[in-house]
Structure formats: C-alpha cells, structure tokens
Amino acid sequence: CHSREKRKIGDRMAVDPMSQMLSGITNSVSQQADYPPATKHFLLIGFLGMFIGSIVFSFLSLKKKENKMQETIMFLAVAISAGCYYCMWSGFGVNKKLDSVGNTRMVFFGHFVDRLFSMPLVIYSLCLVANAEMGETILLLGLDMLMVLCSAIGATQLHPWKWIWWTFGCVLLVVLAVQLWMVYVKAKEANSPSSTGILILTLLTICTAFVYPAVWVLGEEGLEAFDINVETGVTVMADLVGKVVFGLYLLFAVLGAEEEDAEGAEKTSLV
C-alpha cells in the first residue's frame, strides 16, 4: 500500500513540471494591448507584406511545371516570416524584460525565430543562383544560424553580458558578409551571365543583414537613440526588402533574364 502511494506521488511529481510547461504555453496571454500604436501598425504591415509575398511566390511555384526550386524556397521564406509577424502582431512571441536599470522592455523573440529559419533559405537561394560549392553553402548557413542564436541569447542577458553576445554576433556577421562577397566574386570570375544580378542580390542580403545589429545597438536594448516604434519600423522594412524584394528581383530580373536568353539561343540554333 505504501509503495503504491509513493508511486502515485512520484508520477504526480513527474507529470507536474510537464503540465506546468504546457500550461505556460497554452495559457499565455496576448500582450498586444501593451504595444504602442505605431509598433502594432508596423507589425501588421510586416505580416501583410509577407502574406502577399507568399501568395505571389506560391502562385509562381504552382505555375511552373519544372525547375521551381527558387520559387518554392522564396515561398517558404516569406511564409515563415508571415507566420512570425502575425504571431507578434497578435501579441505573442514577445516577452517583457526587466533591464539592469529597472526599466521594462519588450523583446520580440518572433524576430529571432523568423531569421533562424527564413534567412538560411534566402542565403541558400543566393548560393544556388551563384553556383556556390556545397562547402561554401553549408558554411554560410552555419554562420547565419550561429549569428541569430548569439543575438537571441544576448536579448535575454543584461549589461554587460548582452554586449558580449552582440559582439559575437557582429563578428559572425562580418565573416558571413565576407563569405557572401567571395561567392559573388567567384561567380563573376566564372563569367556567370547573371553576375550583375548576383551582385545586387548579394548587396541586398549584406545590407539588410547589417540593419539588425545596428537597430539593436541604437534601439532600446543598446544606446536608446530611438524607441521601439522606430526599431520595429526599420526592422520590418529591412525584412520586406531582404525577402520580398530579394525574391521578386531574383525571379523576374535574374532568372527571368536567364530564361529569355536560353529561349533566344534555342530559337537561334533552330534557325
């Protein structure tokens, strides 16, 4: 009898932590009411932009019968971003953080989830069009994921530890940018017909990637040069440019031009 009671108590103790964790997830309360109006509007713009982009890329992917890898990758990238932005706009994917001074700040962890899954897809898309080696591609994907993880960990830390993680992330970002530029240089040296387009795509990726640490250090987490409204607005614009604009330029200006050249060469050979 005593052993049976002990077993029941042990089972309850084993279940309780899991139940508490699931309860914390399923019973989480939306924090949308605490958002400044401008922040809420920017997050909605981010969701709508990514949602419309996902519809466009989905249509382009379904329209093609073959060679639809790039359209599929871009659809997945912006669809992930759309889901994360909707989550943040509705008041989830955000936590309140009490800093070392005693001020309460909002940390949008949805941004880190978004970048952790969507940015490797964008980088992989760029590597495909540049015909990068598999080793180079894996290195770039690994650098990007490590950079995002450093930023996410830094967002949970207080002064001075957050600056150490921010520095780690910036070092990884610089290495990532150098490697991306080397991929472009190799494509140019190989006389790739899309070298100009690859240059623009590379610059788009590098410039938008540098926006995130700049916003972090100038925003409320860093020097407090501007508030969360500006921080959210700049981040949303960078995301839209780095994914939707990137994808549209890739599919229509770069790959579209390659397909036209291939069709023209085929007609010429037939004549």
Image: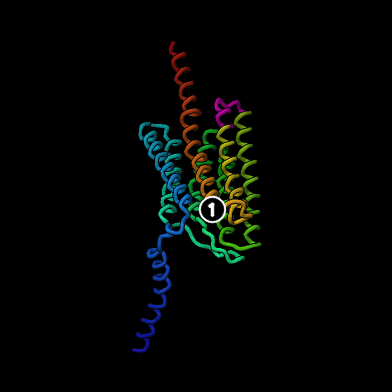
Depth order, front residue of 185/215: 215
Q: Is residue 164 above or below residue 236?
A: below
Task: Give the extent of the magenta segment.
Answer: 189-199
Which part of the image, by quadrant, shows the C terminus? top left
Q: Is residue 54 above or below residue 101?
A: above
Which part of the image, by quadrant, shows the N terminus? bottom left
Q: Amino acid at mark 1?
A: Ile
- The color scheme shown is rainbow
Q: Quick one: label 1, few (<14), some, or many (20+) residues within 10 Å?
A: many
Depth order, front residue of 238/118: 238
Which residue lies at the image location 58% right of the left edge and 55% below the top edge?
A: 220
User: Picture coordinates of residue 76 (x, y %)?
Assistant: 43, 43
- Name the residue tied to disc 1: 228
Horizontal side of residue 248 vs 150, given as left or right? left
Is 197 inside the magenta-drawn segment?
yes
Q: Is residue 118 above or below residue 98?
A: above
Which residue lies at the image location 46% right of the left edge and 24% below the top edge?
A: 259
- Residue 124 in view in this figure: no
User: Picture coordinates of residue 90 (x, y %)?
Assistant: 40, 54
Is 246 inside the magenta-drawn segment?
no
Horizontal side of residue 168 vs 65, given as left or right? right
Query: Which residue of the protein is positioned furthest toward the front in this rendering?
Result: 37
Judged from the image, the secondary structure of the residue bearing numbered disc 1 is helix
Query: Which residue of the protein is positioned furthest toward the left in this rendering?
Result: 1
User: Picture coordinates of residue 210 (x, y %)?
Assistant: 60, 44
Horizontal side of residue 18 vs 121, given as left or right? left
Which residue lies at the image location 57% right of the left edge and 32% below the top edge?
A: 200
